[in-house]
C-alpha cells in the first residue's frame, strides 16, 4: 500500500462522511407550521402528537417530553422519591449526566463496574453493591446495546429497586423484540444534537405506570396538579417542557428514523465481520437478544501488541489522517471527575472501566449512514496502518487523543 497519510501519503478516504443531523423539507414544513400556529412553547399540539407517536413506537403506555436527557433523569429520581440518604447504582463508563442526576437530587452514586465486551453495567457485580440504602439502579444501554435485562429486572425485583433505563443512546434498540425504555419503571431518552433521533436538545420519559406518569407530568409542569386548575400546584416541580419547535423537528425526524436504524445495523454488521478477523482490534459484542441495536457508537477495543506496540493514541491519529474520524472516548471514569469525587459517591473496584478508558476507540453513528463501499474504507485504512507499521517510531511520544 501507499505511504501513510500521517506521514504525507494520500488518505484512504477524501470524501466527506454523511452529515449529522440529517434534515430536509419535512423539518422546514414542521417549523413553519409551529410558527404560524403561534403556540411556540410546550403547549403546541405537536408536542402531544409526538409523545403519542413516540410512545406507540416504543410500545409503552406513556411518553412525556422534557427539556433534555439530564433533567429527565432528575425528574425520574424525584418522582420515585429518591433523595438525601438514598443510594443509586450507576456505571462509571458513561456520560457524566447519569451520575450528575443522582447528585443533583442529593442521593449517593454507587459506581459498579462494566463488562469489558459490552461496556454495559456488569449485573454479576450488583449483589456486592447493595446496601440498606440502595433505592434504584440506572443501567445505561451504552452505544445502543441494551444491558442484560434478563438478569437485571429479576435482580431489581428481588431487592425492591426501581429501574431507570438510561436510553440516551438506544433509540430503536430492542430486547427480545420489545423496545428499551419500556422495560424498567421509567425510561429516559435524549434528543441532544449527536443522538440518533435529535432536535438539537430535548428529552423524553416513558413509563407503563399511571401513577408515575402523573408524577412526571406534574414535575415537568411546575408541580401542577393533574386535572386541577391552571394555578393549582400540588407538588414541587420545575419547567422541563419541550417546545413546539423541537417537537416539530422530532416528528419530521421520525419519518426517516427506521430507514436510518436499518442502515446503521447493516453497516455495523458489515464492519464487525471484517474487523473480527483483524489481530489488534476487537469490535464490541453484539448480544443477539437485542434484535435491534441503535449503534449510536461503533466501538472497538485496540490492543497495541497487534500493531507491534503502537499506542492507541498514535493509531487514532493515523486513522484520522486516513480520513476516518474517530476518538478514544472517555479519558477517565466518572468517579475521577472532580464534581463526583465527594462523600456522596461510593466506589467498588472498577478495573474494566479503567481498561476501557485505555483501550477503546469510538466511531460515531453518522459514519454508519454511508454506503457499504464507504464502510469498507474504514477497514482499508486499518489494514493500511498495519501494513505500513514500520513507518512509525514506536517509542515516539504521542499526544492525548
Image (cartoon, grey):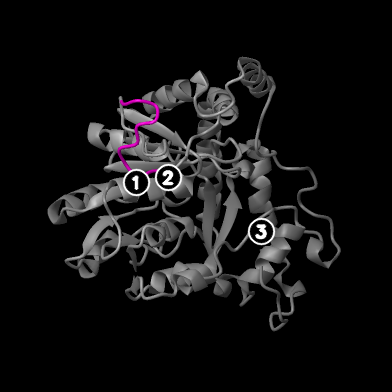
Residue under label 3: 383
Identify the residue at the far front of this view: 231
The quadrant holding residue 314 is bottom right
- Do the numbered discs 1 and 2 sit on residues whose CB atoms are within 8 Å? yes
Position of 396 with respect to 305 (left or right) is right
Find numbered disc 3 in the image and state the secondary structure of the residue it sits on.
Answer: helix
Neighbours of disc 2 within 10 Å: few (<14), some (14-19), many (20+): many
Which quarter of the figure is the N terminus placed in? bottom right
Neighbours of disc 1 within 10 Å: few (<14), some (14-19), many (20+): many
Residue 348 versus residue 172: which sits nearer the camera?
Answer: 348
Give the residue at x 31% y 29%: 226
Say which mark, if any, is on residue 76.
Answer: 1
Find numbered disc 1 in the image and state the secondary structure of the residue it sits on.
Answer: helix
The quadrant holding residue 119 is bottom left
Q: Which residues are magenta?
A: 228-237
Say which mark, if any, is on residue 72.
Answer: 2
Position of 38 with respect to 229 (left or right) is right
Query: Where is residue 331 shown, x and y percent of the image?
Result: 56, 69
- Do the numbered discs 1 and 3 sit on residues whose CB atoms are within 8 Å? no
Amino acid at each position: 500500500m501507499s505511504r501513510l497519510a500521517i506521514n504525507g501519503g494520500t488518505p484512504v478516504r477524501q470524501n466527506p462522511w454523511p452529515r449529522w443531523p440529517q434534515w430536509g423539507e419535512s423539518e422546514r414544513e414542521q417549523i413553519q407550521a409551529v410558527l404560524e400556529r403561534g403556540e411556540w412553547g410546550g403547549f403546541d399540539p405537536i408536542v402531544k402528537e409526538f409523545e403519542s407517536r413516540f410512545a406507540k413506537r416504543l410500545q409503552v403506555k406513556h411518553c412525556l417530553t422534557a427539556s433534555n436527557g439530564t433533567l429527565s433523569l432528575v425528574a425520574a429520581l424525584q418522582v420515585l422519591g429518591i433523595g438525601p440518604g438514598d443510594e443509586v447504582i450507576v456505571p462509571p463508563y458513561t456520560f457524566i449526566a447519569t451520575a450528575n442526576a443522582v447528585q443533583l437530587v442529593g442521593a449517593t452514586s454507587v459506581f459498579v463496574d462494566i463488562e469489558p465486551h459490552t461496556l454495559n453495567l456488569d449485573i454479576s457485580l450488583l449483589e456486592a453493591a447493595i446496601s440498606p440504602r440502595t433505592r434504584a439502579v440506572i443501567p445505561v444501554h451504552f452505544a445502543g446495546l441494551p444491558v442484560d435485562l434478563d438478569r437485571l429486572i429479576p435482580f431489581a425485583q428481588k431487592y425492591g429497586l426501581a429501574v431507570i433505563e438510561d436510553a440516551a443512546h438506544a433509540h430503536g434498540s430492542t430486547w427480545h423484540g420489545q423496545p428499551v425504555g419500556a422495560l424498567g419503571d421509567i425510561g429516559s431518552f435524549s434528543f441532544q444534537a449527536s443522538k440518533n433521533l435529535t432536535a438539537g436538545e430535548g428529552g423524553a420519559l416513558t413509563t407503563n405506570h399511571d401513577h408515575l406518569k402523573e408524577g412526571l407530568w406534574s414535575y415537568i409542569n411546575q408541580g401542577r396538579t393533574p386535572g386541577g386548575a391552571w394555578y393549582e400546584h400540588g407538588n414541587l416541580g420545575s419547567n422541563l417542557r419541550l417546545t413546539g419547535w423541537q417537537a416539530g423537528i422530532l416528528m419530521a425526524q421520525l419519518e426517516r428514523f427506521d430507514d436510518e436504524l436499518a442502515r446503521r445495523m447493516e453497516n455495523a454488521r458489515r464492519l464487525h465481520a471484517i474487523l473480527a478477523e483483524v489481530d489488534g482490534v476487537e469490535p464490541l459484542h453484539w448480544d443477539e437478544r437485542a434484535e435491534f441495536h441503535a449503534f449510536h457508537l461503533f466501538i472497538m477495543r485496540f490492543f497495541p501488541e497487534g500493531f507491534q506496540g503502537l499506542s492507541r493514541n498514535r493509531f487514532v491519529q493515523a486513522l484520522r489522517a486516513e480520513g476516518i474520524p474517530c476518538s478514544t472516548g472517555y479519558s477517565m471514569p466518572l468517579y475521577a471527575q472532580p464534581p463526583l469525587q465527594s462523600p456522596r459517591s461510593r466506589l467498588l473496584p472498577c478495573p474494566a472501566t479503567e481498561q476501557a478508558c485505555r483501550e477503546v476507540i469510538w466511531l460515531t453513528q453518522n459514519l454508519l449512514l454511508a454506503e457499504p463501499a464507504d464502510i469498507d474504507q474504514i477497514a482499508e485504512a486499518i489494514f493500511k496502518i498495519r501494513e505500513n507499521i514500520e513507518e512509525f517510531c514506536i517509542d515516539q511520544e504521542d499526544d492525548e487523543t
